[in-house]
Image (cartoon, rainbow, N blue to C red):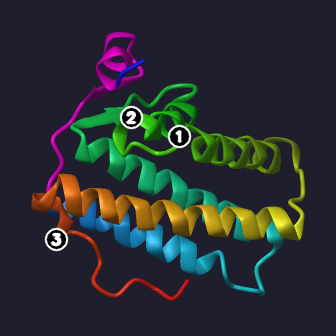
Amino acid sequence: MTLDNLVSIKRLKRHEPTPAEIRKLLRSAERNLADAQIASLSRASQFTCAYASIMQAAQVALFANGYRPFSSEGHHMTMVQSLVHSIDLDPARMRVLDTIRHKRNGIDYIGEEPEPAEVDAARKAAAALLDDLGTWLAAHRKDLAGAIPSSPPTR
C-alpha cells in the first residue's frame, strides 16, 4: 500500500506543511523525549512521553511527504505503519514502533504498567526515529531541513 492508496481509502489526506509547522512538531517531539527521561515521573508517564515523541515524528514524516492523517479511529496505527513509505523505515523497526503503540493503548485504556525495559525500549525507539527523520529530511526535503532544531535535548 502506498501513501496515495491511503488517501483513496480515507486514512490520509493531502497537506502542505510550513517550516514553522515542522519546527514546532520537532521541538515538541524532542521535548517529549526529554520528558521521558525524567526519573520522578511514573513509568507509565515516561512511556507515554516517549510514545508522544514517536507520534510527533511520524506526523512530521507524513507532513514532509504532503500528507496528514484523518482524525479517525486507527490514525495512530496509520501514522506508525506509514513510516515504511514516508521515510523508508525498515519494516522490522516499524513493527517495534507498532508494538510500542499497542502497549500505549494498554496503558491508556486498561491501566497496564510498563516494565522498565519497555520504557527504555520506547525511549530508544523514539530517539532513533528522530535521528532517522532528521537524516531523511536533510536528504529529501532540504527546504524543511532548516526546521530541525539545532540543539536537541540530550538523549
Q: Residue furthest left?
A: 143
Name the element at disc 1. Answer: helix
Taking the image as shown, residue 66 lies to the left or right of residue 80, namely left
Q: As rendered, which of 102 and 125 lies closer to the eye? A: 125
User: How far apart are labels 1 and 3 at the CA level?
Assistant: 24 Å
Q: Tell me if mark 2 has few (under 14), some (14-19) or many (20+) residues whose alpha carbon lies within 10 angstroms of its own.
A: some
Give the answer, above or below, for where 84 lies relative to 129.
Answer: above
* Residue at image location 65% in from the left, 40% down from the top: 95
Q: Quadrant of the C terminus?
A: bottom right
User: How far apart are labels 3 and 2 at the CA level?
Assistant: 22 Å
Q: Which mark is residue 114?
A: none
Which badge, 1 or 3, is on the more N-terminal residue? Answer: 1
Taking the image as shown, residue 28 lies to the left or right of residue 118, namely left
Please, what is the three-letter code of the amino acid marked with disc 2?
His
Mark 2 or 1: in front is: 2
Please, what is the three-letter code of the amino acid marked with disc 3?
Gly
Can residue 72 be found in the magenta stretch? no
User: How far apart are labels 2 and 1 at the CA level?
Assistant: 10 Å
Image spot of residue 26 (x, y percent):
36, 66
Q: Which residue is mark 3?
A: 146
Q: Which mark is residue 85?
A: 2
Q: Looking at the image, do the residues carrying marks 2 and 1 touch, with CB atoms under 8 Å apart? A: no
The image quadrant that residue 36 belongs to is bottom right
Image spot of residue 142 (x, y percent):
13, 61
Please, what is the three-letter code of the amino acid marked with disc 1?
Val
Image spot of residue 57 (x, y percent):
43, 56
Q: Tell me if mark 1 has few (under 14), some (14-19) or many (20+) residues whose alpha carbon lies within 10 angstroms of its own.
A: many
Which badge, 3 or 2, is on the more N-terminal residue? Answer: 2
Q: Which residue is mark 1?
A: 80
Q: As rendered, which of 146 and 11 lies closer to the eye? A: 146
What stretch of residues is rendered in magenta?
3-18
